[in-house]
Image (cartoon, rainbow, N blue to C red):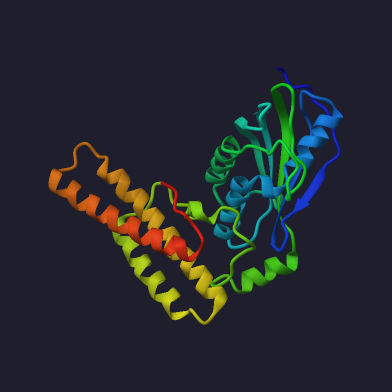
Amino acid sequence: MTAARGVSSGRRASIPAAAIALAAIVTGCTAGTEVRAGLANAAVPAHLPLVRACWEKEFEAAGFRGEYRATVSFVVEPNGRIRHAKVKKLASEEGAPERDLAPFRACIEGALDETRLPREDDENGPGFSSSSELAVENYVFAFVDGSSEARAEAARRSENVLIGPRADRCQGLYSHDPPRDEVDLYTEIGEADSAWSLSKEQPDPYARFLQKAYDLRLELLDRLRREVDDPDLPDANRKKLRSAIEEAETRVKAIGAAIGCTPPT
């Protein structure tokens, strides 16, 4: 289908008990106003956990500041699955961004391509269904901090604050691509392990350091798995790497259990 441009009313959705909000506005779709409004109503943050996770990761990496507006095109299948997502424009609401937004852009596209909207209403909001495939143009995501006071507080306590309920913290929140060298990761893992074990009586820092220990081990696993797949790696080194991978998998599962996560495979 060829998308026909149109305008529908915007719908702002905030994340309960979180300092971050995600607003979704449909400004173009192959269908009429009713369908466009239905899509906007279904695209609440709780139905887009991977997209929200991209935003939370970017927000934290940027020092708990910065707001963005992404203009996206994608296709919605009748079963609610989103595919062929493409960020056509990603702009900072504060002018020229200080950070490279390419990883954020790629994360949004990948997250949407792994998203399926529920067809039926659920506890998080309305569902969405269509009798045919829909091509959507100029769908706008506004990534905004839901509370300026919360943002200021986060900036003051950035060393030990978790911003809201992390949408998909189990996937890992590290942003290094490719992952860093093992020596740097093992150093940070040691520091994180020491920090969370010493902060068990302080909920905020304990949660943050435990999450960091989990993230670091996922990054380490990513690095080790890339290296073990190198066809030029000597057999002796491959054997050591596989042993290191098994140890890292055991530790990340244990930490994951402590934060209610099953690590991605």
The answer to whether residue 92 is seen in the rendering is: no
Q: Residue furthest top?
A: 1
Q: Residue at x 56, y 38 (%)?
A: 114
Q: Residue at x 74, y 39 (%)?
A: 127
Residue 136: x and y in percent read 71, 28
- Confirm whether residue 45 shows in the render: yes
The quadrant where residue 81 appears: top right
Residue occupying the far bottom of the picture: 201
At a point 30% along the width and 50% down the height, the residue shown is 224
In the image, 176: left or right of 14?
Answer: left
Between 71 and 195, the one lying in front of the other is: 195
Q: Position of residue 115 (x, y in %)?
A: 61, 38
Q: Quadrant of the N terminus?
A: top right
Q: How many marks?
A: 0
Relative to 138, say whether 17 is above or below: below
Q: Is residue 189 left or right of residue 30?
A: left
Residue at 66% from the left image edge and 27% from the top image edge: 77
Which percent across, then down, holds residue 229? 27, 40
**Closer to the camera in the image, 161 or 197:** 197
Q: Is 224 displayed left or right of 107 in the figure?
A: left
Question: Residue 37's x, y, as percent?
Answer: 82, 36
